[in-house]
Image (cartoon, rainbow, N blue to C red):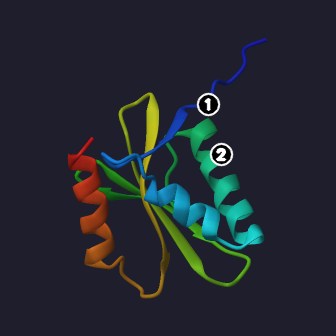
Amino acid sequence: MNQIKPMALAMWASSTGSEPARDWFKALPDTDRKKVGQDLRKLQYAWPVGMPLVRSLGSGLWELRTSLPSKREARVIFATDGETLLVLHGFIKKSAQTPTHELDVARKRLKET
């Protein structure tokens, strides 16, 4: 029987070793963290995935879209090299469009990899 192998999942780390996306994830309330974790797992096992779970942001960036039990919207911005999903940034979405600042953070981190 063939077993599906999940893609590796990595968190972006700064030159000092901090992992801001992991810190954001760990700070979420338990029920919200569980939901984001479930969606990350779906991503690992089913990549490539399209809407409504994942949307391309262009320039190699992708957005994982999670509706949280707390009635908020979480977004995880990531990149992939075909073997690894690299989580660059996570945030709670408060407007219809993804804020430019949030995209800039992810773009900067991607350039530093």
Placement of the N terminus among the 4 image quadrants: top right
| Distance in Å between CA atoms under marks 1 and 2 | 8 Å
Classify mark 1: helix, strand or loop.
loop
Q: Position of residue 55 (x, y in %)?
A: 42, 59
- Residue at which label 2 appears: 41
Q: Residue furthest front?
A: 16
Would you place residue 37 above or below residue 6 in this image? Answer: below
Q: Amino acid at mark 1?
A: Pro
Splitting the image into 4 quarters, where does residue 72 fall? Answer: bottom right
Placement of the C terminus among the 4 image quadrants: top left
* Label 1 with label 2: CB-CB less than 8 Å: yes
Side of 99 relative to 87 (left or right): left
Q: Is residue 65 visible?
A: no
Q: Position of residue 81 (x, y in %)?
A: 35, 33
- Residue at which label 1 appears: 6
Q: Position of residue 42 (x, y in %)?
A: 65, 46
Side of 94 relative to 35 (left or right): left
N-terminal of the two: label 1 or label 2?
1
